Image (tube, grey):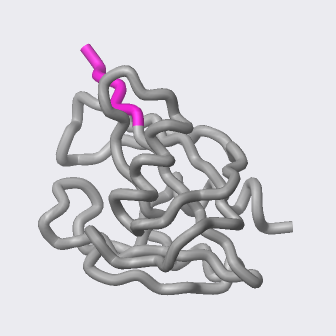
Amino acid sequence: MVKIIKCAAFLLLKNGLMLVEKRADTKKVYSGVIAIPGGTFEEGETAEQAAMREIREELDVEPISMTFLGIETDKHAYLPDSIFEIHYFKVEEWKGTIKKLEAAELKWIPIDNYKELAPKPDRDIVKKTLIL
């Protein structure tokens, strides 16, 4: 039986740039790659609640507003009997100073450089919703 793993991911955008992370080598899924930050839902959370929590946990900032971009799915060799259902949000305003709390590295890249993102769902959501 296939297990659905729900995840929330967030695109912080500023002046035509998006914040991406180099995932820590200790992560079991997509370790060491450039990706959109995010994480899995906790029991009983909505997608928006999970995204808000993940932003605080990973960057120590509070979104002023978020826009839902869509859902992409993915499979990963580490969990072959699972499908990741990734709920993406766009954040253009936030309170606080961004801190690197979980990622190996954070960097701002031009939105047009979305092909640097290793996970296909990350590339797909940017291409579908942000590339005109």
Residue 18 highlighted magenta (yes or no)? no
Is 1 situated left or right of 22 in this image? left
Q: Position of residue 54 (x, y in %)?
A: 40, 52
Looking at the picture, tell me which residue is in the foreground, 110 or 101. Answer: 101
Residue drawn where x is 40% and y is 74% of the image? 21
Looking at the picture, tell me which residue is in the foreground, 77 or 109. Answer: 109
Give the dominant element type of the magenta stretch: helix, strand or loop: strand
Looking at the picture, tell me which residue is in the foreground, 94 or 48. Answer: 94
Q: Position of residue 111 (x, y in %)?
A: 68, 77
Looking at the picture, tell me which residue is in the foreground, 56 or 71. Answer: 56
Q: Position of residue 80 (x, y in %)?
A: 22, 36
Residue drawn where x is 79% and y is 67% of the image? 131
Is 119 situated left or right of 42 in this image? right
Quadrant where the N terminus is found in the figure: top left
Return the residue found at the far right.
Answer: 132
Residue drawn where x is 38% and y is 21% of the image? 44
Return the residue found at the far front.
Answer: 96
Q: Eyeballing the image, is 48 above or below 104?
A: above
Quadrant where the C terminus is found in the figure: bottom right
Residue drawn where x is 41% and y is 81% of the image? 106
Q: Position of residue 16 (x, y in %)?
A: 75, 81
| Magenta span | 1-6
Is 12 situated left or right of 101 in this image? right
Number of marks: 0
Is 79 situated left or right of 66 in this image? left
